[in-house]
Image (spheres, rainbow, N blue to C red):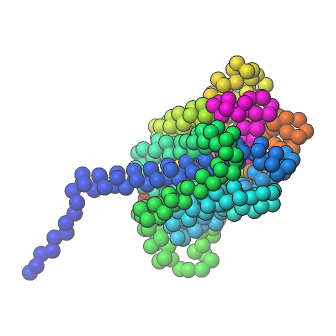
Amino acid sequence: MTTTHTITKPPAIQTSALQSRWLLVFILGYFALIADGADVMMYGLTLTRIKEEFGLTNVESGALGGLTLVGMAIGGIAGGWASDRLGRVRVVAWALALFSVGAGLLGFTHNFVEFAAVRFISALGIGCMVLVTTLVAEYVPTERRSLILGVLQTGISAGYIVVIALSNWILPHYGWRTLYYLSALPVLLALVIKFAVPEPASWQASLIASLDRVRGFAGTRYFQIFSQPQSRTLFILWTVASVFFLSGFYGLNNWLPTYLEKELHMKFSTMAGYMIGTYVVAFIGKIIAGWLGDRWSRRGVYVLGCAGAALFLPVIIFWHTRENIIYLMLVFGFMYGVPLGTAGTFMSESFTTSIRGTAVGGSYNLGRFCSGAAPIVIGFVATQFSIGIGFLIVGAVFFLSGVTAIFIPDRLYDTQQ
């Protein structure tokens, strides 16, 4: 009789291989979020120059930002569903390629309609970048997940800093179009992700299980979400929390550079330096939030972060001076980073693997869709009053997002299972 022996790797080798794999996924995901953050911030930094060249009003400028969010929402909802069906890696890679090439093409536009059309199409890809967090969450160890995903979210802040630094150098000498041409480079990163990262094991197992189910409408992801009371309630709560938070997030990002230049009368170089400092401090806020999320509560950190950002915005608007504005912005940057540092883990752990991409992509991007009105509203308020008064609305919606999150349970599902 022949005896067959199964050769297995020693535990130490297996552990080393797994660690190398999630580190690779983390690093590539981090660079993808740098590209995401740079793209989101670029419009705000170039807005003044685009307004002047195209002859746009405040409302038209806000409409371009709002249209971007609508494109993000549609792309993110479709991408979330596709990631459950086709794979996280495939969707992230194609989305990154789409918005990188689209951003580069913006440099060739010459009027409102051309810019709006190209921006809308490229925004379809940007909307899928929330799935980078889902992808990394399904790789990283459970005991350090919140900290690692908190560090991952600093990639967005790093993207802000990179594009602000580039803007300070490029815009005065080469113009806003050159900045958009350079933004096409991350298409190379999309190719690396596509061929270097395998799909997470938990997604592969979920796909096999889903193929064994009876096909038909009853097997669709949205039917699964809304047929179960718990997942239905969580989807609705996350949609509402996302509407409020993203309205504040995009309203602030679209108009903060213009506010500093036009209402606080800062030179572009000074404004760029202040914003870099703000987002560096946001790095720290995100990392501390991730660390606290692992040791205490994802929900508690998110709620406190939203409340802190909401309450500090009026301080900046009403009590700033030329001497203290930099310190106020640094404190706000920390507060602003805290909810972003734990939101990815908190949200990913609210849904099972089989519906996670659809649920996270759907609820987050429905929030994006509704938040598309925020830049327009701030543009209208800026015309009637001031951008600073518009930022009071930003503070209110940050606060409401934190209130909504109080009703979302913590740590429901392990994303590696």
Image point (40%, 53%), residue name: 24
Q: Quadrant of residue 143?
A: top left
Q: Quadrant of residue 205?
A: bottom left
Image point (60%, 52%), residue name: 182
Image point (64%, 42%), residue name: 170
Image point (53%, 33%), residue name: 284
Q: Which residues are magenta?
A: 245-274
Q: Quadrant of residue 221?
A: bottom right
Give how far across and how far down residue 208 sits, in percent. Answer: 44, 73
Give how far across and how far down residue 110 sits, in percent. Answer: 78, 57
- List the single residue furthest toward the left: 1
Magenta stretch: dominant secondary structure = helix
Above or below residue 220? Residue 180 is: above
Give how far across and how far down residue 48 sits, in percent. Answer: 77, 42
Above or below residue 109? Residue 387 is: above
Which is nearer the eye, 407 or 104? 104
